[in-house]
Image (cartoon, rainbow, N blue to C red):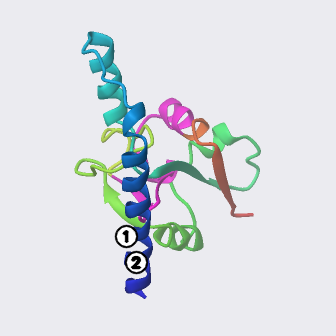
């Protein structure tokens, strides 16, 4: 259970500290500069977990192109049940985790999953309030797309 994970994490920390100690002779002091400050600020924005966006589209009868699927505003009951199981439905207005490019103006809520290693946000056009063109841009930015077919 939990004890194993803590022992494993402690061992990893001890190994890391040992590596720091052994590499002290190779540490080089940094010269303060505007470039260094900018690089450190960028480094601060890198999350500690892997992040992923996944688009979830509903395909209605006769729809072949994703741009048409992005315009759908509703889905069947099974589709909506599927969405409920993807993760917590977080309000974008107050969500401070990974957003995957979503703004609070794009949707009121969206499915979101996270654990110690990863954060996944789902781009779901049927939950979006953004205009069709914006929905398409958001969906097309997702490298993974799930298409739920209703026919």
The quadrant of the picture occupied by the N terminus is bottom left
Left or right: 119 in relation to 41: right
Up-down relation of residue 46 to residue 6 (above or below): above
**Residue 100 location, x and y as percent?**
45, 42
Q: Are marks 2 and 1 in contact (CB under 8 Å)?
A: yes
Q: Which residue is mark 1?
A: 10
Q: Residue at x 58, y 73 (%)?
A: 78
The span shown in magenta is 109-138
**Residue 118 within the magenta-colored segment of the rendering:** yes
The Cα–Cα distance between marks 2 and 1, rounded to whole angstroms, is 5 Å
Position of residue 74 measured from the top left corner of the image (x, y, whole percent) = 52, 57
Residue 110 relative to residue 36: left or right: right
Classify 10 Å Cα crowding around label 2: few (below 14), some (14-19), many (20 and above): few
Q: Which residue is drawn at the image coordinates 28% and 15% (left, top)?
A: 31
> As rendered, which of 45 and 65 lies closer to the eye?
45
Q: Determine which residue is flagged by label 2.
A: 7
Q: Is residue 134 magenta?
A: yes
| Residue 34 position within the rendered picture, expressed as x and y whole percent measured from the top left | 27, 11
**Residue under the point 31% across and 27% down:** 40
């Amino acid at each position: 259970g939990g004890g194993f994970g803590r022992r494993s994490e402690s061992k990893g920390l001890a190994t890391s500290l040992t590596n720091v100690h052994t590499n002290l002779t190779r540490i080089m002091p940094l010269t303060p500069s505007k470039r260094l400050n900018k690089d450190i600020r960028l480094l601060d924005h890198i999350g500690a977990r892997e992040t992923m966006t996944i688009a979830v589209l509903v395909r209605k009868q006769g729809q072949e192109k994703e741009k048409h699927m992005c315009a759908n505003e509703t889905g069947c009951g099974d589709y909506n049940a599927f969405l409920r199981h993807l993760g917590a439905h977080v309000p974008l207005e107050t969500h401070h985790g990974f957003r995957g490019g979503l703004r609070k103006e794009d949707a009121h809520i969206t499915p979101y999953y996270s654990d110690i290693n990863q954060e996944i946000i789902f781009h779901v056009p049927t939950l979006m309030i953004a205009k069709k063109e914006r929905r398409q841009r958001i969906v097309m930015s997702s490298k993974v797309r799930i298409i739920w077919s209703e026919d």
